[in-house]
Image: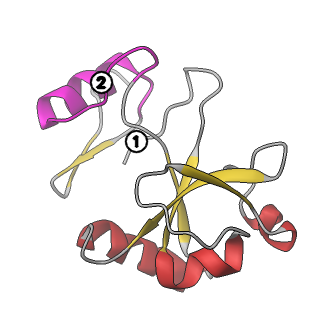
Amino acid sequence: FFFQAEDGIRDYKVTGVQTCALPIYFCRQYPSYCMSFVSKVREEKQSQLPAITHVDGTARYQVLRNEHNPQLYALICAFANETGVPVLLNTSFNRAGEPLVETPRQAVLCALASSADFLVVDGSIYEPANR
């Protein structure tokens, strides 16, 4: 998981567990598995999701099932157990103007060229030496 701040304006998205996040947080009830849709965030939930709620009250969302990505699903469930919020901030893993990261080598190069504090690959946490 990677957070980018140096690129200026980024379209942050939300990834959530379908069975609980979609009807509670979003007005649109159609599942989007590839962050293809935008929905109004329910007004009473916008304060819980300020990082992903656009100025017009919408958000680009992705729903997740366990069979799609068991590790991410488990992380979202653990986060929900701790916070009561079954969604996580999500963004693409790349720097502005560059293609998406697809391999561990590309992940390392991207992290080193950015302001990333940490990089997690295959369950191991790496901290760039020059930070």
Q: Contact (CB < 8 A) between labels 1 and 2? A: yes
Dividing the picture into quadrants, the one containing residue 64 is bottom left
Q: To which residue does mark 2 refer?
A: 110
Question: How far across and down, in percent of the image, does residue 24 sit?
Answer: 68, 80
Asked if one can make out residue 16 in the rendered structure from this viewpoint, the answer is yes
Q: Identify whether 70 is placed above or below 81.
A: above
For the point 30% across and 78% down, the residue is 66
Q: Identify whether 110 is placed above or below 30.
A: above
For the point 42% across and 14% down, the residue is 97
Range of residues picked out in magenta: 95-116
* Magenta segment includes 40: no
Dividing the picture into quadrants, the one containing residue 107 is top left
Mark 1 vs 2, N-terminal side: 1
Q: Identify whether 33 is placed above or below 16.
A: above
Asked if one can make out residue 85 in the rendered structure from this viewpoint, the answer is no
Element type at mark 2 = helix
For the point 56% across and 49% down, the residue is 13
* Magenta segment includes 104: yes
Which is more toward the observer, 12 or 126?
Answer: 12
Callout 1 crowding tier (Cα within 10 Å): few <14, some 14–19, many ≥20: some
Q: Please state if 3 lies on the left or on the right of 26 as rendered.
A: left
Q: Please state if 67 lies on the left or on the right of 87 as rendered.
A: left
Callout 2 crowding tier (Cα within 10 Å): few <14, some 14–19, many ≥20: many
Element type at mark 1 = loop
For the point 82% across and 52% down, the residue is 57
Q: Please state if 50 lies on the left or on the right of 110 as rendered.
A: right
Residue type highlighted by circle 2: Cys
Question: How far across and down, in percent of the image, does residue 96 sit?
Answer: 46, 18
Question: How far across and down, in percent of the image, does residue 62 sit?
Answer: 49, 59
Q: To which residue does mark 1 refer?
A: 2
**Colour setup of the view:** secondary structure
- How far apart are the alpha carbons under marks 1 and 2? 10 Å
